[in-house]
Structure formats: C-alpha cells, structure tokens
Amino acid sequence: MLTAAENEALCRVGPGTPMGKVLRRYWTPAFQAADLPEPDCPPIRVRVLGENFVAFRDSVGRLGFLDELCCHRGASLVLGRVEEGGIRCLYHGWKYAADGTILETPNLETSTFRERVRHGAYPVREVGGLGWVYLGPAGTEPPFPAFSWTEAAPGELAISEMIMDCNWMQVQEGSIDSSHVAILHLDTLATMGAGPRSVGTFDFPGEPWDLDMPTPGAGRAPAAVWPSNDNAPRIEVENTPFGFHYAAIRDVTGEPGKRFVRVTAFAMPYTAFIGGVSTGAVIVVPRDDYTCSSIGVFRVPGGAGGRAASRRALGVDPAVWGPEPENRRIRLPAQDRAAMAAGQSFAGFRGGNRIQDAAVQLSEGLLYDRSKEHLVPADLAIIRMRRLFADSVRLVAAGGAPLGLGEGCDFARIGAASQIIAAGEAWQDLVPANQGVREPARRA
C-alpha cells in the first residue's frame, strides 16, 4: 500500500504538482478532433491536467490550443469568434493566431505590445482522431507515440469517450488489472458463451443475461472464450522502452501442461493495450484531480467508424451516455438486484465491460485513499505502474526526463496477446516487438 503522502503525489495532477510536472512531459490526448469538424467552427473548452484551454480550427484547418483566458483582461476565448485565421476575444476584440501570436489589439493602436507578447499556446497534433498536446517546457518534446491505430483511415476508427467523476488513477489501475476480468465481467463472459463459472463458493450458471451486449466471441466453444477457471493469475512483469508489459498466466482447465496467457502492455503515461483486445487501446487522461476521460480507440472493419459505431463496438448502451459532444459524463444504469438474487446476473449492470468497470471505479470515491488497501500478488502490474510513476517524479524533480518516453521504440508495433501456450513456452515470444527487459517473476 501507499502512504497518504505517496497517494497524494500519485493522484494530484495540477500545475506545479509532482505528478503534474511528470505528465506534462508526454504527449497528451486532450480532445476529440471531431469536436472541431471544420475551419472556423465554434471553439471548444478543454480541461486537462487541472487547467482550462481553448481549442479551435482556424480558416485553413490548422488546430490551435491556447490558454483559455484572454491575456488582456481574462475573458474566456471559448466565447470568442473564430474568423480569418485566428480567434477573437469578444471583450475587447484582441485576436490570436493558432501559435499564440497576437494579431490585432483594437483598443491599442500601437503594435509594440503585440510584437513583444505572445499568448500561451502549445504544440498540438491531430492524429488518430484525437487532438494531442504537449504542455511541458519548450524544447523538451519526446518522440510522438505513433501507435498502430493512429494512422487509420477516416471511418476505420471507433472513438468512445466517457467522462468519469473520479481520479484518473482509479480508472488507469483498472485497465492493467487482469485478475478482475473473470470475476467482475462474468456477465460479459456469459453473453460470449463461456458457460458456468464460480467465484469462491458462488456458482454462476453462466446463462446470457445482457442480450443487447455486442459479443465478438459469440458462437465459439466455451473453452475458446475463457479456457481457465483460475481466478488468481500469476503475474510476470517486465519494463519496456515505453513503460512495461506483463503476463497474467492461468492454468488451462482440463489441459495439464497448458497455460492461458494474457499479455497487456502499458505505454506511459496514459495508454493500455489489453490482452484479448488487439485492435486498439484504452486511454485514461486526467481532466483534473476528480474527473478523467476514459477513451476507447479501436479499429473497426469495413470503414464502419464514427460515434454510433463507437458505442456499439465497445458494448455500451447509448442510454447511459449523455448527448455528444455537450455531455459525455457516464450515467450508470440502475443495478438489477433482482437479476443478481436470481443468479441471472453477477454484477447487475447492463452495458458491457466498460460500464461494469465504471461502476466499481466510481464506487471508490472521488479520490481513493490507497493507504487503506491491502495488495496481493495479482496486483503486481499495478505496483509496477506506481513504481514507474514514482521514479519518474524523482527523475523530473532532479532535472531529468521521465521514464517510458519510448526512445528507440516503434510505437506502432506495441502489442498485446491472449493465447494458450505450452507450460515451457515463453510468453514474451507472443509480443517480441515490445522489447521487454526479462527479469525473474516476483511476488508482492
């Protein structure tokens, strides 16, 4: 467990905080590019890492990412006019270019001021349907993480964002926690056809309950859906140039000498490539200390992307979402206690894995106090992630760079895996491009 002080250092992300300084040294996916659909369209407010910004698309389609408040008298540029190559503040008409250059100051005739002052502006890239920004010191930008899905053609990506009212670390830890999958997500496995399972002394019949949930694995034999009754996987973790990857290793039911392995990769500081989900990633970005965005980015076949496809592909009932883009805050469906009591449902939440995950992560409160937790060997990946962040805090405080910047790494080849292998086979061979640094398995 962490001390209260260590927990604060891990979770607080605002300007000047230890973790805030670390996160500002990576490229941050801050908004959906589709929210700025055309040149000179209305600007949007973006809250990320405890600060407010304005994002806009100028007359030639270039993105701008600026401090929200006008540097004259502090009016919000989100109210401004996007016109003729810039964004104009409504209060006194000051106009800014995408790079922060002050183009016009109508209430000040002389040009001297605008020639020597520049509004706060930040490097921004439109890649993979997202607007990525760099908020760190000028000249310290790391290599851009060009993941495999970032170069997908229009219509090939499903991007789905949930705004959650809790600290980002609660959601991030869920992304790299393999031992909950065959417990919390029993309803998902049942809908996929995994059959009866048990959690401790509770026997779950495994009949499909959430019939509206998309089921990519439906129709396969139960053993192919989830071939293990082992709820306590053995975790092996290795550092990589981009962060770390780990294997959750389970015995295969009825097949001595076989192992069911799920390899998950975590690219610092936001992105998880989850074993069994090979076409994209889950990204968790802190808006501030008490809210975060959980962004699913997945390739979809046949150019069937878009927002409606995003929700279908990710197994989320549209009834639990607010209208886009005005409100993406998750609205959990009611928990069906009657279905739970009847043994029809394990968790009682319809909508698939992300809704089930959100329910338990939100239940931990706005900012969970990890000084009260009791970790077990199945939490080794979470321990490793916290260690990398803590080490990065120390490195940045000493004037260095954080870990996991990916130097020498081909981000496009970062991979996850879910496969049955022989007991003596190395799981690392499933993901050779991850460049893991092999080390002995350790227990918590």
Image (cartoon, rainbow, N blue to C red):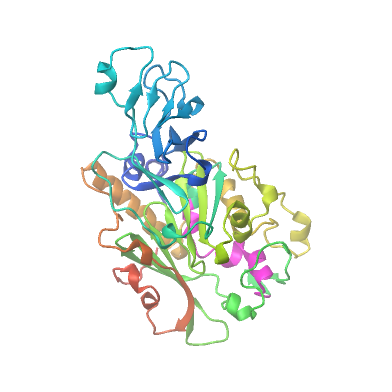
Magenta stretch: includes residue 178: yes
Q: Position of residue 15 (x, y in %)?
A: 36, 34
Q: Is residue 426 above or below residue 435?
A: below
Q: Is residue 188 visible?
A: yes
Q: Is residue 279 above or below residue 432?
A: above
Q: Position of residue 96 (x, y in %)?
A: 37, 27
Which residue is depicted at the point 45% across and 36% down?
56
Q: Position of residue 413 (x, y in %)?
A: 37, 67
Name the foreground residue: 213 vs 232: 213
Magenta stretch: includes residue 175: yes
Q: Is residue 329 above or below residue 237?
A: above
What's drawn in magenta, residue-wise?
172-195
Name the foreground residue: 317 vs 244: 317
Which residue is depicted at the point 34% across and 70% down?
433
Name the foreground residue: 59 vs 415: 59
Which residue is depicted at the point 45% across and 46% down?
285
Is 322 left, or right, of 232 in this rendering? right
Quadrant of residue 203 within the rendered picture: bottom right
Q: Is residue 238 above or below residue 316?
A: below
Q: Quadrant of the C terminus?
A: bottom left
Quadrant of residue 73 within the rendered picture: top left
Which residue is depicted at the point 36% across and 17% down?
105
Q: Main secondary structure of the magenta part?
A: helix
Name the foreground residue: 265 vs 306: 306
